[in-house]
Amino acid sequence: MSRMLKFKIKRQDSKDAAPYWEDFTVPYKSNSNVISCLMDIQANPVNSKGEKVSPVVWDCSCLEEVCGSCTMVINGQVRQSCSALVDKLEEPIRLEPMTKFPVVRDLAVDRSRMFDALKKVQAWVPADGYHDLGPGERISPEHQHVAYKLSECMTCGCCVEACPQYSKNNDFLGAAAMNQARLFIMHPTGKNLRNERLNVLMQKGGISDCGNAQNCVEACPKSIPLTESIADLGKQVSKQFWNNLFSS
């Protein structure tokens, strides 16, 4: 008899419904990931009791750890399910939705709060047109090295899921948004909004709400130096505070 993989999946039929656990088994395939197993369950949505049930809902897109949409809690650890190989996971494999965001259904959550945080820190490069403005500033290799690493953020949510300061009941922006604030402050054109971004980070939910737990940098699948970004912004915010005080 072929080997079967055991899954325990935390399900929720709607955003207002109570969560419950449901067990599934799928045929073992060497080097398969969690997403491929979820696809097998979706193709044949029968639980371990032999009951026909509704297909499990989850989010995914790129399947190569770039889009960030397939984040979930796997065996108690928040991570990308596309890069979670079943050969390296203990059974039964427990799948849960992230806890810091509203559940839409099953393993799919609403991460709108993360994108709203990016809007607050204006995580973009302002442009007043697309006419030729001539050559831009020369950027050193050292600057490029730092900025490129910061730009790898995919807004997956791992950092804020692991953060003890980030909860459904507060306004904390979280490490991802702060990291992007630093990235765009470094940008030759994006730096024009530096003061506005730093003023946002002074407000409630900003830099002072970080407890320096450093869970974020441990959970980040891209190994982005999130704590370095927060520390760097802390220095900039302090200078901005005194500038605001003496210029008012």
Image: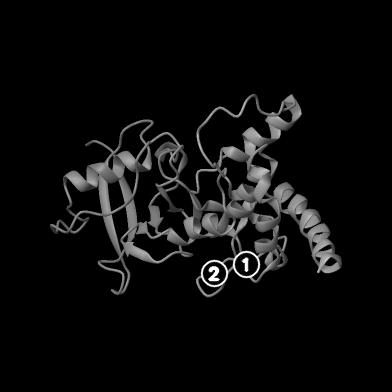
Residue position for label 2 = 167
Q: How many marks?
A: 2
The percent coordinates of residue 201 (x first, y second) are 67, 62
Q: Can residue 153 be seen in this view?
A: yes
The percent coordinates of residue 88 (x first, y second) are 47, 39
Here the colouring is one colour
Estimate how packed mark 2 is, as few (under 14), some (14 to 19) or many (20 or more) residues with alpha carbons within 10 Å.
Answer: some
Depth order, front residue of 84/182: 182
The percent coordinates of residue 133 (x first, y second) are 60, 29
Q: Which residue lies furthest to the left in this view?
A: 52
Q: Is residue 169 above or below residue 100?
A: below
Residue position for label 1 = 165
Q: Do the residues labelled 2 and 1 touch (CB within 8 Å)?
A: yes
- Which numbered tag is attached to residue 101? none
Residues under labels 2 and 1: Cα distance?
6 Å
Q: Is residue 176 left or right of residue 34?
A: right
Q: Residue at x 31, y 33 (%)?
A: 29
Q: Which residue is drawn at 50% across and 43% down?
A: 154
Residue type, label 2: Ser
The percent coordinates of residue 217 (x first, y second) are 65, 49
Q: Is residue 16 above or below residue 121?
A: below
Residue type, label 1: Gln
Q: Can residue 182 be seen in this view?
A: no
The image quadrant of residue 32 is top left
Estimate how packed mark 1 is, as few (under 14), some (14 to 19) or many (20 or more) residues with alpha carbons within 10 Å.
Answer: some
